């Protein structure tokens, strides 16, 4: 029988649980033309949420354009990719694509190549020199198409923080912002997996995208939903788990969506019929072993004081820059502690949640406690 759990890619249908309020909110923003930025630590479910809501609203009158900047490294690639995605989303005829491109990218005058399978092997080539002079034609393309066709567009851009690595990031962001903010028929949803970079792009007053739209800070999924999700999934596949055990799985990885799914899967796969505490413990070890290479690497890259700082965090120390903590954990000076904190935040090892420094990755925290602090994870 196939596992009822899913992780490692965006989830949908029976693998997608809860997020009722987030879905409603995002859907309402899409329908009301409110630009939205989604921010959360890694693997909390941003892409899955956008994919779900995009699927719900996509229609003849409200067309969703999905763009993933994961492979995009510079401005030139961005323009090509962006214009191609917008053009392709608004019709399913190659002739129409070419017509639109010629009509609205007049100055740039694009070239086309159409392969054996025209719908899939369609490429637009833009001459970079001309794009640099006429980039506005590209950025205003969605608004012009929407107006002409009397439709609304929602443009969802994943891994948006990649634009911060382009050649002249500030200039480029200013260009995007000044074109996009006036558009009446196009709504943007911007999100990405690097929380720290996304926060810098959208929360800093000095940055072009400051107050571009609403920032939604996505939360984890609450324990009660995980309990229901896990117990139902076991039931569906004729295996037995109690609510307490499901709660244990969710708690073990602090309700982190990706890891709850992974741990539930590892538990499910070792369970013949009925889950036991021993199986959950075994599954937790499996999970840590599967990710161990990554965690070793992360740890290797830490300086001695950074490592000490994390030891203090793992030991639940809250007053990290107190004299006592500094001397007990050998953290240098309090200025040093601030610097360590800043670096670890930037490298997305830690996060500050409700004023408290925590590991951003709950499984790394478990691994760290087990292998660096030599703690017994299952001690009562
Ligand atoms: N609504 C949900 N219900 C159940 N599981 C979920 C949900 N959302 C996310 N997950 C779990 O978390 C994993 C990561 O989801 P997703 O890729 O959508 O997150 P993300 O925030 O976009 O990640 P990244 O920061 O790496 O881009 C999924 O593979 C799935 O296991
Ligand atoms: Mg994602």
Image (cartoon, rainbow, N blue to C red):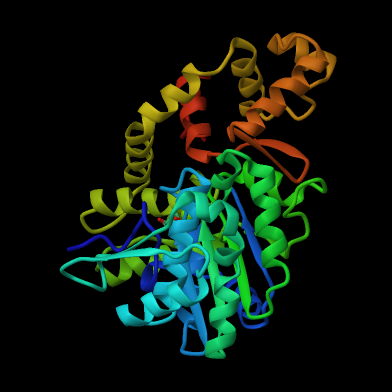
Residue 70, compared with residue 92, is above or below; it is: above
Which one is nearer the viewer's eye here, 86 or 323?
86
Q: Residue at x 37, y 34 (%)?
A: 291
Which one is nearer the viewer's eye here, 27 or 236?
27
Q: Position of residue 28 (x, y in %)?
A: 64, 80
Res 379 visible? no
182 on left or right of 119: right
Q: Residue at x 53, y 65 (%)?
A: 107
Q: Residue at x 65, y 13 (%)?
A: 305
Q: Position of residue 117 (x, y in %)?
A: 18, 70
Residue 205, compared with residue 25, is above or below; it is: above
Q: Quadrant of residue 21?
A: bottom right
Residue 349, compared with residue 98, is above or below; it is: above
Which one is nearer the viewer's eye here, 300 or 225?
300
Res 343 visible? yes
64 on left or right of 311: left
Q: Position of residue 51 (x, y in %)?
A: 46, 69
Q: Position of residue 309 (x, y in %)?
A: 66, 20
């Amino acid at each position: 029988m196939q596992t009822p759990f899913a992780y490692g890619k965006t989830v949908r249908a029976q693998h997608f649980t809860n997020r009722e309020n987030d879905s409603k909110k995002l859907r309402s923003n899409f329908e009301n033309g409110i630009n939205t930025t989604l921010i959360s630590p890694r693997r909390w479910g941003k892409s899955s949420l956008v994919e779900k809501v995009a699927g719900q609203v996509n229609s003849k009158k409200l067309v969703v354009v999905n763009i993933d900047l994961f492979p995009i490294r510079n401005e030139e690639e961005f323009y090509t990719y962006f214009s191609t995605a917008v053009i392709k989303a608004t019709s399913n005829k190659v002739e129409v694509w070419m017509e639109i491109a010629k009509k609205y990218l007049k100055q740039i005058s694009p070239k086309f190549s159409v392969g054996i399978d025209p719908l899939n092997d369609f490429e637009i080539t833009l001459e970079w020199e001309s794009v640099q002079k006429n980039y506005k034609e590209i950025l205003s393309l969605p608004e012009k198409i929407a107006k002409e066709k009397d439709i609304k567009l929602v443009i969802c851009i994943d891994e948006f923080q990649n634009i911060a690595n382009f050649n002249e990031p500030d200039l480029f962001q200013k260009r995007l912002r000044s074109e996009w903010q006036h558009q009446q028929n196009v709504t943007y949803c911007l999100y990405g997996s690097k929380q720290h970079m996304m926060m810098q792009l959208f929360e800093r007053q000095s940055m072009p995208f400051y107050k571009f739209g609403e920032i939604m800070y996505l939360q984890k999924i609450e324990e009660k939903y995980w309990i229901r999700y896990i117990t139902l999934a076991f039931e569906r596949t004729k295996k037995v788990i109690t609510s307490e055990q499901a709660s244990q799985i969710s708690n073990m990885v602090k309700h982190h969506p990706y890891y709850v799914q992974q741990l539930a899967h590892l538990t499910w796969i070792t369970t013949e019929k009925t889950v036991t505490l021993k199986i959950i413990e075994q599954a937790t070890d499996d999970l840590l072993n599967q990710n161990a290479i990554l965690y070793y690497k992360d740890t290797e890259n830490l300086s001695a004081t950074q490592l000490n700082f994390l030891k203090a965090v793992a030991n639940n120390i809250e007053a990290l820059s107190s004299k006592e903590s500094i001397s007990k954990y050998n953290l240098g000076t309090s200025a040093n502690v601030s610097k360590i904190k800043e670096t670890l935040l930037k490298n997305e090892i830690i996060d500050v949640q409700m004023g408290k420094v925590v590991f951003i990755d709950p499984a790394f925290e478990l691994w760290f406690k087990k292998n660096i602090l030599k703690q017994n994870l299952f001690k009562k």
